[in-house]
Image: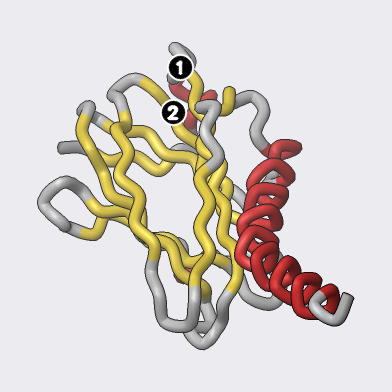
Amino acid sequence: MRFAPLLLLLALFALLPHTGHAQCGDLAEQCGYDLLPPFNSDGQFYRVELYPGEVARLKLTFYAGVAYRLLPCSENAAKNPVVFTLYDRNGTELYSNQSTLDQRQWDFAFGATSQYTLTFRFAKPESKGCIAIVVGYREISQDPDADDELIGFQP
């Protein structure tokens, strides 16, 4: 009986690392799905737990003729938004949302199919917590005015 408190304490410590992952998973599932339409989810939950000063990297293939919507979110996005940067396969920076942190979504189109790298970090580098990214896609419209809001990249 005198070991019961020790066993309870050990059990609690064993569960602690899983708590952060569960919260990150919950965040990914709640992240901006209301903003996704008319885009379709790519079906993936991209999430990461960052510690002060860390930057996450995600490699994705984007296809020509398809529009994409990125929805980054964090546990407290209003006070500490997510900064993302898009790079081409040569490491050239194509876009950063640094100057538009008050937006909740960004729409892109690519002139060629290629692999791109997205980096994510908190606006306040001393922060830690979860970041989740939802990626949506849809075919580019045949009506040129319908896609005026897309940020476009050519090879």
Residue at the extreme top of the image, as rendered: 142
Residues at badges 2 and 1 in contact (C-beta under 8 Å)?
Answer: yes
Which residue is drawn at the image coordinates 45% and 69% (left, top)? 121
| Residue corresponding to mark 2 | 67
In the shown orientation, is residue 59 left or right of residue 92?
A: right
Residue 76 screen position, x and y as percent: 71, 69
The earlier-in-sequence mark between 2 and 1 is 2
Q: Amino acid at mark 1?
A: Glu
Give the total number of marks visible in the rendering. 2
- For label 1, the residue is 139
Would residue 94 be found to the left or right of residue 55 on screen? left
- Separation (CA) of disc 2 from disc 1: 6 Å
* Quadrant location, the C terminus: top left
What residue type is disc 2 on? Ala
Q: Who is closer to the viewer here, 6 or 89? A: 6
The vertical placement of 128 against 106, above or below, is below
Please identify the residue farthest to the right as the structure is shown: 1
Which quarter of the rendering shows the N terminus? bottom right
Viewed as shown, does residue 92 lie left or right of 152?
left
Residue at left 53%, top 24%? 146
Say the numbered circle drawn on residue 22.
Answer: none
| Residue nearest the observer in this picture, 64 or 132 | 132
Residue 19 against residue 2 in the figure, above or below: above
Residue 143 rendering spot, x and y as whole percentages: 48, 15
- For the residue labelled by badge 2, is the local secondary structure a helix, a strand or a loop? strand
Q: Residues within 10 Å of mark 1 (few under 14, many from 20)?
A: few
What's the residue at 58%, 23% (across, down)? 40
Q: Residue drawn 57% across and 47% down?
A: 71
